[in-house]
Image (tube, rainbow, N blue to C red):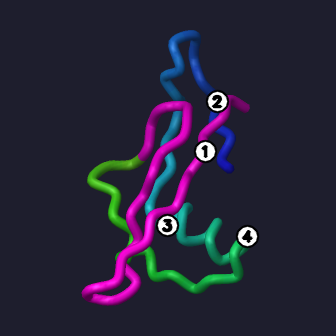
Amino acid sequence: MFKLKAGEHGKTFGSVTAKEVADALKREAKAEIDKTKIVLHEPLRSLGVHRVEVRLLSDVRANVTVAIEPA
């Protein structure tokens, strides 16, 4: 779970990047995932729950849930 400062309409001041997702997976799931294996078309900038694809191997993919809450 990530906590970001947010305005009234859920717009955040900042974002969650693939590197931050990789760091969280290492810290919480004890999984070493290279940030280039995390598929984010752009950084996550809105509050709520987001599904993020992780490419473990060329033909193996997993989805992880990323929650962003107001700080």
Q: Residue 28 got which mark? A: 4
Q: Nearer the viewer, residue 53 or 16?
A: 53
C-alpha separation, residue under disc 2 versus residue under disc 1:
14 Å
User: Crowdedness of circle 3 by 10 Å Cα count: few (<14), some, many (20+)?
Assistant: some
Q: Position of residue 11 (x, y in %)?
A: 49, 23
Q: Position of residue 61 (x, y in %)?
A: 36, 76
Answer with mark 4 or mark 2, whichever residue precedes in sequence. 2
Kind of residue indicated by mark 1:
Ala
Q: Main secondary structure of the magenta part?
A: strand
In-image side of 37 versus 41 (left or right): right
Q: Secondary structure at mark 2?
A: loop
Residue 25 sits above or below residue 40 on the image: below
C-alpha separation, residue under disc 3 versus residue under disc 2:
19 Å
Contact flag, marks 1 and 3 (Cβ < 8 Å): no
> What residue is at 41 percent from the left and 71 percent from the top?
54
C-alpha separation, residue under disc 3 versus residue under disc 4:
14 Å
Magenta part of the protein: which range? 44-71
> What residue is at 52 percent from the left and 29 percent from the top?
12
Residue 6 sits above or below residue 18 on the image: above
Answer with mark 4 or mark 1, whichever residue precedes in sequence. 4
Residue 8 sits above or below residue 12 on the image: above
Kind of residue indicated by mark 2:
Lys
Q: Residue 19 got which mark? A: 3
Label 4 or label 2, whichever lies nearer to me, is 4
User: Crowdedness of circle 4 by 10 Å Cα count: few (<14), some, many (20+)?
Assistant: few
Answer with mark 3 or mark 4, whichever residue precedes in sequence. 3
In-image side of 2 versus 51 (left or right): right
Q: Secondary structure at mark 1?
A: strand
Kind of residue indicated by mark 3:
Lys
What residue is pinned by disc 1? 67
C-alpha separation, residue under disc 4 versus residue under disc 2:
22 Å
